[in-house]
Amino acid sequence: MSLACLSCLLSHWRYNPIQLVAYITGLALATGLWSGVQAINTEARASYAAAASMLGHGQFEQLVPQIGNTIKQQRYIDLRRSGWLVTPVIEGRFGDVRLLGIDLATSPINFLPNQGSAGPVMQSFFGSTVLFANAETAKKLDGLTKIIVDTSIMTGVAITDVGTAQRLLKRRDLTRLIIIPEQPLGRPDLLAVAPDLRLQSPNKSADIGELTDSFHFNLTTFGLLCFAVGLFIVHSTIGLAFEQRLGMMRTMRSLGVPLKALIILISTEMLLLASIGAGLGIFLGYFIAAALLPDVAATVQGLYGAEISGTLQFRQEWWLSGFIIAILGTTAALISRLIQVAKMPLLASVQPRAWAMNSSKRLRLLIIGSLILFSASILLSLTGKGLITSCAILACLLIGSALALPILVERTLIVFQRLSHAAVWEWFWADTRQQVPGLSLALMALLLAISANIGVTTMVSSFRLTFLAFLDQRLAPELFVQVDTQDKSIQLEKFLISAGVEILPLLSTQREFSGQSIELYGVRVGSTYRQNWAFLGAFPNAWNKVQAGHAIIVNEQLARRANLWLGDPIKLTPNLTLPIAAVVADYGNPLGQMIVAENKFKELYPDIYPQQFGIRTQDVTKMRSIITEALGITDSAMVNQTTIKTASVDVFERTFRVTAALNALTLIVAAFALWMSLLTLADLRVPQLAPVWTMGLTNWSLGKLEMLRSIMLAALVFFCAIPLGLIISWVLLNIVNTEAFGWRLPMFVFPYDYARLGLYTIIAAVLAAAWPVARITLTPPAKLLKVFANEH
């Protein structure tokens, strides 16, 4: 009996293939977008884990400099002679690659798992100038030196012997020392041997995954939004399938099929089809991720310096999560319908759309749900903190607005109906009201997609305007020069001073403050800083106070994370505390920063020399040539403002492309939801259109009215989405962005972009209605007349 009943249920899809396509395609799109985002995030996190493992972060204790970024090689020799078992590591940029120099014989980390540590590998390692890298990285080093390909090495990193690395980098120092776990007893205290070094615990090492958490969290939020929009299609299709099979279910119950067995069979049928859709969605997600991964990789490398492999692997974590969330989403959409089946009287009406039209109770529930969610969003915004809470505010706003949409549409249509006097238009508005329950899920999906587009477009465009202005402020010096040694630094400064050129040397070091790693900068206060830097908040004559060594400037990230603002004291040393004179915006930087005057910095850290110089010049090309000829500084160590700005903008443009792609995919899914709803309802509309047709309206007139209905509903949803989108953008800029990155952006409005999005919405509505309208227009008279010969 079970097989016969299951076959009976499945026969519905054979006679309604469009619904079957809608169900499987909707779930495939939803799962594909979610899986694609998760595939990107999983690949990125795998790269971060590989980097942490390979570079030794988070595994062993390390010795790092108290001041600056390098360790003298003599310090390593002193530690080894005193009994400390440490192994040296040197890191630097060699061409476009991160070069890692190690001592393979003493390192506790297996940097070359595919090679081992004996025989030919050791000979290659110590015998000549040879680097180990994967195939992708080897292409970047082609022709520079000998490369041995090792697939286990992460992208963007090349490994060699520490001595070879020093020769290639033209350095005689080290970056850090890894402490070998087994240490001899009786070794001297660290302060006695190396007072300029400090011990760094594994959990204090830099974790690029933590810095990029907010970026990947944003991608995950997009994935969930896309999944939610796609799930509306599934929910709508399931509802219509149940509605059309009321008669079949009544007949099966009348013939003796137990209610429990019927529910089990329906669940089996739906979950079986859901598994097919989820499988297709997982493969779709793979191709989406493969298309977006290069831009995401470039983004996180540019923003955080993290390397992500350019190849996408079919990892269990993301495809399994996609499959599970697809099944759970289908189950959630199925439960309400199964409850209706359980409560359905045995001889329930089989009128098409009987459930949908019983809307008074449904509207009350929508109003209650919407009010609860709006209240929750207000309460969370007033009392909650953290990234999760911020996204919960967004979720409450979006879902609450989606639930309120049918009510707003219903009330608007009532107003239009009351203003109409012609019989045709009164029927049109009344008939449109009747369609709202059947189209409500598709309209909700469209609202979510449009409002998310408006919100994200506003945020991204606001960020673009602000960031470009910020670059002009920070990149005021026309030329930047990087030096590697203290001698070069002194020579460059003396040469430029003698040439009468304004220079801006930059001193920097990293330190701990308020439980976080921050950057401390020393700057030479002059006209460039005074004229070009704009503050979020500042005391009068802030630069004068900083120049005199009586105050400090902090960036917005540090101010918000440490709950600081103007006038608050900063304890730089046990004997030195300075007040905050100004807070500066520092967009795109995940780290906190402090800025003091050059003289004050030298008092604190006399051994640190400036490695970067900003130079004001009217002729960048000529100045580069003069510096190269006079001091021998290579052209690659000098960058002009235009190059930096172009590279910076390119990084963020890649980020915007990822966002724009996800925005477009979300809108496409919403348009597909509307199309499927209209198409599925087309056959159900015949009994309602037949009486009007008999009164004189032609098929062509009915088709035009149906098209107008689709355009009008899409326009109505668009106008509802504008205020919601602007609220979303405000939340993103002022709450989510502050929690995620530590800085707040000004909000700008872009009417032209919104108008273009409105045009896309109308086009989507026209395309969605084209086929259903064609089916109605081409409906033969016999089919319309047949309506009056049956129970309808």
Image (cartoon, grey):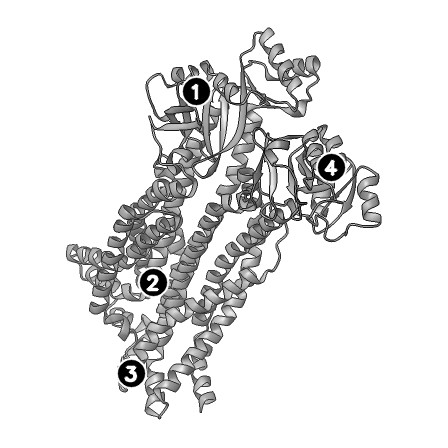
Residue 161: give x, y in percent of width and height. 75, 39
Q: Nearer the viewer, mark 3 or mark 4?
A: 4
Would you name the residue on which mark 1 appears? 532
Dot 1 amino acid type: Asn
Q: Residue at left 48%, top 67%?
A: 324
Dot 3 amino acid type: Asn
25 relative position to 191: left or right: left
Residue 689: give x, y in percent of width and height. 28, 69
* 381 shown above or below 784: above
| Mark 2 / mark 4, whichever is N-terminal | 4
| Mark 3 / mark 2, whichever is N-terminal | 2
Would you name the residue on which mark 4 appears? 162
| Quadrant location of the C terminus in the rendered image | bottom left
Dot 4 amino acid type: Val
Would you name the residue on which mark 2 appears? 441
Residue 336 appears in the picture as rendered: yes
Marks 1 and 4, how far apart at CA = 43 Å
Q: Nearer the viewer, residue 536 or 576?
A: 576
Q: Nearer the viewer, mark 2 or mark 4?
A: 4
SS class, disc 1? helix
Marks 2 and 1, how far apart at CA = 51 Å
Q: Residue at left 51%, top 54%?
A: 37
Residue 388: give x, y in percent of width and height. 38, 51
Would you name the residue on which mark 3 appears? 790
